Image: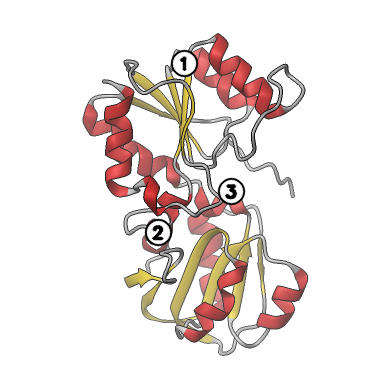
Amino acid sequence: MLLRAIINSIESVAPRSAQESWDNSGMQVGDTGRDITSVLLTTDITEDVVSEAIEYGCQLIISHHPLLFHGLKQVCGQTPQARVVEMAIKHDIAIYSAHTNLDSVVGGINTRLAERLGIRDYRLLTESGLGAIGSLPEPVNYLDFIEQIRKTLDCSYVRYTRPAKELIRTVAVCGGSGAEFIDTAIEQGADVYLTADCKYHEFQDADRRIGLIDIDHWYSERHAREIFRDLIEPLGVKCIISERDKSPILV
């Protein structure tokens, strides 16, 4: 299967035109005309992940977070990104990423996260398409919902504020760093907002206005790998979900 056909399948759901202006989704290393028989799927691209792809004989790595956000001035092993580029080129491995374009569409990161948490009748949270908001089948206790998050997402940690009310039903989510949409979630009528990377004063401002729940960034988006698999396997390409793709945060 040509790499461009795999990209077309992903971008039929998450077109690159949907990415944020600061983002760098798309090809990171390699060309689209090569033939692909197996692909390694990952959230982040690290040296360990590339080594895994080499061991499996994969010709392609697809990640959620792009390898390259800023231009490399040198490719001589001085940074982790440069070493990854060197390894990929040496072993003839292409790298492709789908980031905020996968965040901002129905069927992408946020609506899949909503589905995993049992949120129904969801819609996109923001005008740009980031986040999702919907309802639980029935009202639940706030702390019980937090325990559900721990179990369902297998989180390394969960941090949270006091909610506006103990019985919650309307839930907003945004995988990754979504603290900028706390007020949007409140305006949209959410009882709870789940995201990652919240700061102290953001917790302080949300306290008793909304149940702000903060989890590890990686855990909020690792299901990108399953989305990629669902889009690629029907093409007859072998998909391997990385076992070395881990959160860099240890608790």
Q: CA distance from mark 3 to mark 2?
A: 15 Å
Quarter of the image where the N terminus is located: top left
Residue 64 in the image: state x and y as whole percent: 49, 42
Is label 2 in contact with label 1 (beta carbons under 8 Å)? no
Horizontally, residue 154 falls left or right of residue 205, namely left
Crowding near the residue tagged with mark 2, few <14, some 14–19, many ≥20 C-alpha atoms within 10 Å: few
Quarter of the image for residue 74 reads top right
Q: Secondary structure at mark 3?
A: helix
N-term mark: 3 or 2? 2
Query: Any mark on residue 116, and which?
Result: 2
Q: Is residue 195 above or below residue 14?
A: below
Badge number at residue 218: 3
Whole-percent x and y of residue 46? 62, 29
Badge 1 amino acid: Tyr
Mark 1, residues whose alpha carbon is within 10 Å: few (<14), some, or many (≥20)?
few
Q: Is residue 90 visible?
A: yes
- Answer few, some or many: residues within 10 Å of disc 3's Cα (few below 14, many 20 plus, some between 14 and 19): many
**Marks 3 and 1 in Cβ contact (< 8 Å):** no
Q: Residue 176's spot in the image, x, y percent?
A: 56, 56
Q: Relative to 179, is 140 on the left or the right? A: left
Residue 177 x %, y %: 60, 59
- Where residue 24 is drawn, which disc sits there? none
Residue 154 in view? no
State which tag comes first along the sequence, 3 or 1.
1
Give 142 or 97, whichever is nearer the viewer: 97
Residue type at the position of mark 3: Trp
For residue 56, the mark is 1
Q: Earlier in the sequence, mark 2 or mark 1?
A: 1
